[in-house]
Image (cartoon, coloured by chain):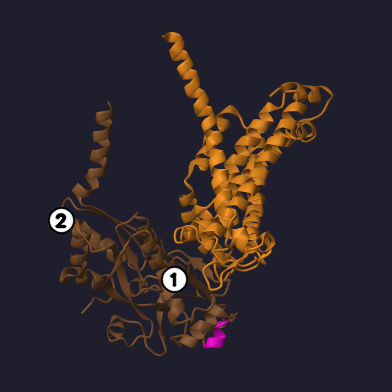
Chain colours: A brown, B orange
Amino acid sequence: MKKILMSIVALGLAMPAFAGKAVMEGSTTVLPIAQKAAEVFMNNNPGEEISVRGGGSGVGIASIIDGTCDIADASRAIKPAELEKAAKKGRNLKAHVIAMDGISHIVHPSNTVTNLTREQIKKMYTSRASNWKEFGGPDLRIVVISRDSASGTFEAFSDMVLDRKRVRPDAIMQASNQAIASIVARTPGAIGYVGLGYLTPAVKAIGVDGIIPTKESVLRNKYPITRPLFMYTNGKPEGTVKKFIDFLKSPEGQKIVNEEGFVGLK
Amino acid sequence: MNKRKERLIKYLFTALAFSSLVFLIGIVLVLFKEALPIFGKVSLKAFLLGESWYPTSEPPEFGILPLILASLWVTLGALVICVPIGVGSALYLHELAGPRQRAILKPVIEILASVPSIVYGFFGMVILSPFLQDTFELPIGLCALTTSIILGVMATPTVASIAEDALSYVPRSFREASFAVGADRWQTLTKVIIPAAGSGISTAIILGMSRAIGETMTVLMVAGGAAVIPHSVFDPVRPMTAAIAAEMGEAPVGSDHYNALFAIALILFLITFVFNIAAEFISRRFRLKLGLSR
């Protein structure tokens, strides 16, 4: 009896490695790329299995440190505190840049504002400024939408635009890029920020410091709020993880990045 | 052999019965263990009455008053919806509905209880909040009112079915006695049946409150998530459950933020604990009043 049990347990432990499974978790900005790439990858490589989850960059990095995922998607670089934690757990996280992105500020299509300076955006997010009139727009209450603290996009935005000043407390907090895009699409006074891949005709991307976020302006590094998108692995990638990362960096993988609306690596 | 088997089965069931107790104690211990460290950094008063919740900024601030008030607001709002509908349905089912209507209505109410909360959340996000936003010309539809309405609907089946049970516990003799002294149906209902079932109905309401205040997925989706003290029902709010759910995933284990989230959970647990004790207390009194034994 005991022997049978033991062998079942052993089989259970051995199975994942044998079947080529990997779990990927984290940034909702990277999510569309990750999801599409995983689908194509699994199609090309029958037997390999990659499961993809969102949650936010912070969640992905926390998970890979805890060992509950194999690839952490992140839309920001790892923080020193996280590195320290990883080291304590004996993990050596390796960063793979898989795409470039511009954090795009979006408003309702009916909003007449087409450009804001970084200073103006900072004012909207950190002060009590409440009317679009102050920013050359319609007489409409501003609804500031931001991301929860688990978001890498929030961290990057906070670094590059807010100078790490606190977001006003009455800002609406949402858990994903998609949630922000859909709220902005139906809220005339809203302003939010999302990754390039989430720009659709339902929302209007506004220029920052005079430059509209497009693939082109991000690629040429003209757009002021540009950042790399990462995948983190534990140590040098192996097996399925390596195959997947290699695939994503290959021309075929980078094509997916572009199709999803982000900027591929040159 | 048979006797041994019987004893074994008895032990098995004893263990199963006590397992809930073990789970409860385990949960309470973990809550306290993970929550207490935060009070070494922030005083209990600053934690409960602080008005700024900035757990990840430098330096962090852990004031959960906006979160507590948000939870209480949406729960009270939910009561405004679920008490009239729930108690009203119970009264109708018990007093007026014929057997055929009962056969349809009761299962329907129970099905309402079995709709997953994510479905309610989705409904609130996609249908109700745009509707309220247009109707009241709100800056944004994700607010305390939307949350209250959805939570109220979610808590309705709890209130209805427990209140209906309470009504059915009222002995027939009460009603017969009332009719015998010449009271009409309305008088019997308001002067005899409802007072007799009153504490049972209060229990139903309190359990409905517990249901509403502990709900997570829905509030995460429709409350808006702004950690400010609400000034009107149209303000977006961040109830305690939503804060925990949104932030737990990335809070490093053992950090202040992590401990603070456990402390919120502890406070939430204490609130629902008090609710449930109150419900139990009231329903016990109610059984005694009706001359029913436990």
Q: Which residues are magenta?
A: A131-136
The one nearer the camera, B100 or B283, is B283
Q: Which residue is mark 1?
A: A185
**Residue B200 visible in the current orientation:** no
Q: Which label sits on residue A45?
A: 2
Q: Position of residue B180 (x, y in %)?
A: 81, 22
| Position of A263 relative to B19 (above/below) | below
Q: Nearer the viewer, residue A217 or B166?
A: A217
**In the image, what residue type sits under mark 1?**
Ala
Spatial separation of the CA atoms under disc 1 and disc 2? 38 Å
Picture residue at 20% right of the left edge, 68% below the top: A253
Q: Quadrant of residue A167?
A: bottom right
The chain that hosts pointer 2 is A
Left/right placement of residue B290 relative to residue A187 reads: right
Left or right placement of residue A248 versus residue B274 in this view = left
Q: Quick one: A46 or B38, which is closer to the camera?
A: B38
1 and 2 marks on the same chain: yes
- Count of numbered badges drawn on the protein: 2
Residue located at (18% from left, 65% from top): A247
Secondary structure category for the residue under label 2: loop
